[in-house]
Amino acid sequence: VGFTIEAPSLNELFEGAAILTFEVMTNIKKIKNKIIKKVEIESETVEQLLFDFIDELIFLKDANYMLFSKFHVKVTELAKGRAIIKAELEGEEINPKKHELKVDVKAVTLYQFYLKKEKEKYKASIILDI
């Protein structure tokens, strides 16, 4: 399962990618924002940061049995191309009676993965392994 996303800022692109990742798995409108999880990740590049962020979301779904529907992110570009994200994720534990799970995403893949800036917007392509 894959998608392409465009946004005017890195923050909006990362938030949109997170929403689409969970929308692939379930109807996010049915997720209540009962729990807030804070995440901080630093990576070698902004592109790697997006990959690592989506990977962390999938890990939290599997390890903590959590679904998220709201994301507040702050992406900061650092020296030497490095980047960091500080994010608050809002969601709840998976309840099979309440949450219709469409597919179980196993991982984000590097196949056709990219993040690039085009004029006044950012564009990314993400493939999820199911």
Image (cartoon, grey):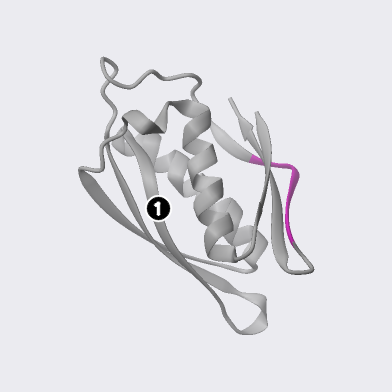
Q: Is residue 56 magenta?
A: no
Q: Position of residue 41 (x, y in %)?
A: 46, 63
Q: Position of residue 22 (x, y in %)?
A: 47, 36
Q: Is residue 13 above or below residue 92?
A: below
> Which element carries disc 1, helix, strand or loop?
strand
Q: Amino acid at mark 1?
A: Phe
Q: Residue at x 63, y 66 (%)?
A: 46
Q: Is residue 105 visible?
A: no
95 and 62: which is toward the camera: 95
Q: Quadrant of the N terminus?
A: top right
Q: Position of residue 68 (x, y in %)?
A: 36, 41
Q: Position of residue 124 (x, y in %)?
A: 70, 51
Q: Is residue 44 above or below residue 62?
A: below
Q: Overall secondary structure of the magenta stretch?
A: strand
Q: Is residue 115 magenta?
A: yes
Q: Residue at x 29, y 28 (%)?
A: 94
Q: Which residue is mark 1?
A: 71
Marker count (numbered): 1
93 and 3: which is toward the camera: 3
- The stretch of residues the image draws in magenta is 109-116
